[in-house]
Image: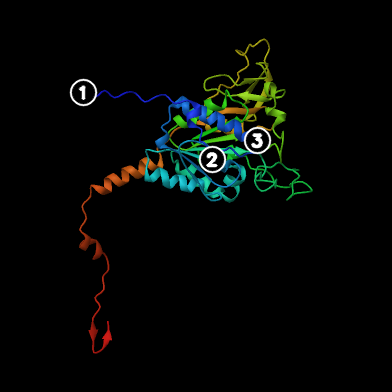
Amino acid sequence: MNVASPPEKLTPKDYASDQEVRWCPGCGDYAILKAMTKTLADIGASREKTVFISGIGCAARFPYYVSCYGFHTIHGRAPAIATGIKLANPELDVWVIGGDGDMLSIGGNHTLHVLRRNVDLQILLFNNEIYGLTKGQYSPTSRVGTRSPSTPLGSLDNPVSPTLFALGAGARFVARSVDTLQQHLPVVLKRAHAHKGASFVEIFQNCIVYNDAVFDEFAGKKAAPDALLWVEHGKPLVYAGGTKGLRLNRERMALEVVPVEDGKTDDLDLLVHDETNKTVAQMLLDMPFGAFPVAMGVLYCNPAPTLEGAVVEQRSKAAGRKRDLNALLSKGETWTVGTTAGAVS
């Protein structure tokens, strides 16, 4: 009698490919890659059933550096190609990698549709607020005033919020993290993987060459303790070492910051994070930085039926139905073509 041995547990190094990693020294993508290989090891991902799909840009090199299947596709079309892969084989575990330009400019429509269709994919948007691969032009997420080769006098465009875009497109899972948060980012990635349906994760990623330190005001080591709000389902929304909290001003139906003294929150009516509440998620994502913190973590998670699940069910029902081909061909209006005195009627 043969006894099957359990598969050997893989380590993060086992998920790293033998390809030379070719990002600029100091690029935030290195940290994201490290968090990803750790995540794959933690969840025990099967390399034979894992696929990474990317478009064009610095982030799009990601599939080369992970030891599994992958496609480096065309500009903006990674969500569409990933959808086709998932529909062709729902058993595959598909990750979609793209930058803010790739996914929100030429690929904005594809990102929208993959989210509203709720395809079971993990969609990671690396947001560095610039076009890095093509030498630093401003992107859809660049802030007003951003100086770049394409906006030498400063950008005049209002930037897109990737997470608000995702929420508006119908995403059922929306989260945020930062490339340097090596304790936090793998936790968010594991939550995204566990979610059944389209998971959208915005990762603030530093471009050391063309937009260095753009997130330091809230993600830098000195600023982060007071500027970041770590959201956790069922926990009060407090930050700055527990000295500040958020509550809902019911007259204005808006969030407001209140001081918290000695960690006492009982009488402050602070908001408790409910990740199934889409309205509160939108408020948290729409908070203007400065007067408010930047929310990090799983902002919204409310599962719904997936597209590939519906497609599989539809195929199964169709396969069980017997059809008469001749009856289908003659269904509806028909014409008889013949010749009478040399004419066709």
Image vertical order of residue 266 relative to residue 188, above or below: above
Residue at the right extreme of this rendering: 153
Q: Is residue 301 left or right of residue 268?
A: left
Nearer mark to the viewer, of 3 and 2: 3
Residue 189 placement (x, y as % from top left): 51, 30
- Asked whether 92 or 240 is in front, the reply is 92
Q: Callout 2 environment at 10 Å: few (<14), some (14 to 19), or many (20+)? A: many
Of helix, strand and loop, which one carries label 2? strand
Element at label 3: loop
Q: Quadrant of the N terminus?
A: top left
Mark 3 vs mark 2: which is more N-terminal? 3
Residue 120 at x, y percent in the picture: 43, 38
Residue occupying the point 62% across, 14% down: 265
Residue indicated by mark 1: 1
Residue designated by label 3:
27
Query: Label 1 vs label 3: CA separation?
Result: 53 Å
Name the residue type under label 3: Cys
- The quarter of the picture where residue 209 lies is top right
Gap in Å between the C-alphas at discs 3 and 2? Answer: 16 Å
Q: Amino acid at mark 2?
A: Ile
* Residue tagged 2: 97
Q: What element does badge 1 sit on?
A: loop
Circle 1: residue type: Met
Q: Residue at x 60, y 49 (%)?
A: 105
Give the residue drawn at x 44%, y 45%. Answer: 83
Mark 2 or mark 1, whichever is nearer to me: 1
Who comes first in sequence, dot 2 or dot 1? Answer: 1
Q: Which residue is at the front of the view, 142 or 64?
A: 64
Q: Quadrant of residue 185?
A: top right
